[in-house]
C-alpha cells in the first residue's frame, strides 16, 4: 500500500476567475474575508484546487422540489 498523499494541485487566480466566471474584485474580496485560502509567491497568487472544491461543495443547495417540478413539466407536453 502506498501511504503517500497525492500531490496537491495549485492553480493561479486567472484560472480560478476563468473556471468560476468571477471578477478579480470578487476573488480579492474572498481572499480578504478568508473565504478562499491562498498562497502568494512574490506578486503571483495561488490557490489549492482542493480548497476551491471544498468551497463549492460547502455551498451546494439541494432543493428536493426542483426534480419533481422538472419531471412534471417534462411530461406535460
Image (spheres, helix red, strand yellow):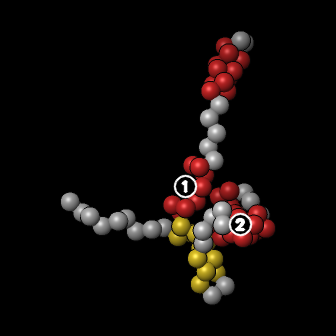
| Whole-percent x, y for residue 76 in the image | 71, 12
Among the 4 quarters of the image, the one containing residue 55: bottom right
Task: Identify residue for label 2.
Answer: 33
Quarter of the image with the N terminus in it: bottom left
Q: Is residue 7 left or right of residue 77?
A: left
* Residue ranking furthest to the bottom: 42
Q: Which residue is mark 1?
A: 54
Residue 25: x, y in percent? 79, 67
Residue 51 location, x and y as percent? 55, 61
Determine which quarter of the picture holds residue 38. Answer: bottom right
Q: Decide if residue 75 is in sight here.
A: yes
User: Does residue 27 lie above or below 55 as drawn?
Assistant: below
Q: Quadrant of residue 23?
A: bottom right
Q: Please give the count of numbered marks on the rendered protein.
A: 2
Q: Which mark is residue 13?
A: none
Image position of 38 (left or right of 9): right
At mark 1, the secondary structure is helix
Residue furthest to the left: 1
Residue at the image position 75 percent from the left and 66 percent from the top:
29
Q: Is residue 14 among the parts visible in the rendering?
A: no
* First reached walking from the N terminus: tag 1 or tag 2: 2
How far apart marks 1 and 2 lie (CA) works out to: 16 Å
| Residue that sits furthest to the front in the current view | 33
Say above or below: 14 vs 56. below
56 in relation to 46, above or below: above
Are circles 1 and 2 on residues that touch, CB within 8 Å?
A: no
Give neighbour class at mark 2: few <14, some 14-19, many 20+ (Cα, 10 Å).
few
Q: Residue at x 67, y 27 (%)?
A: 66
Residue drawn at x 72%, y 12% as measured from the top left: 77
- The image shows residue 57 at horizontal and vertical percentages of 57, 49
Q: Residues within 10 Å of mark 1 (few under 14, many from 20)?
A: few
At 53% across and 67% down in the image, what residue appears? 48
Amino acid at each position: 500500500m502506498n501511504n503517500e498523499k497525492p500531490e496537491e494541485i495549485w492553480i493561479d487566480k486567472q484560472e480560478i476567475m476563468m473556471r468560476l466566471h468571477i471578477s478579480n474584485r470578487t476573488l480579492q474580496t474572498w481572499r480578504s474575508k478568508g473565504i478562499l485560502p491562498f498562497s502568494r509567491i512574490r506578486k503571483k497568487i495561488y490557490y489549492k484546487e482542493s480548497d476551491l472544491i471544498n468551497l463549492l461543495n460547502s455551498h451546494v443547495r439541494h432543493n428536493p422540489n426542483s426534480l419533481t417540478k422538472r419531471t412534471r413539466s417534462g411530461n406535460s407536453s
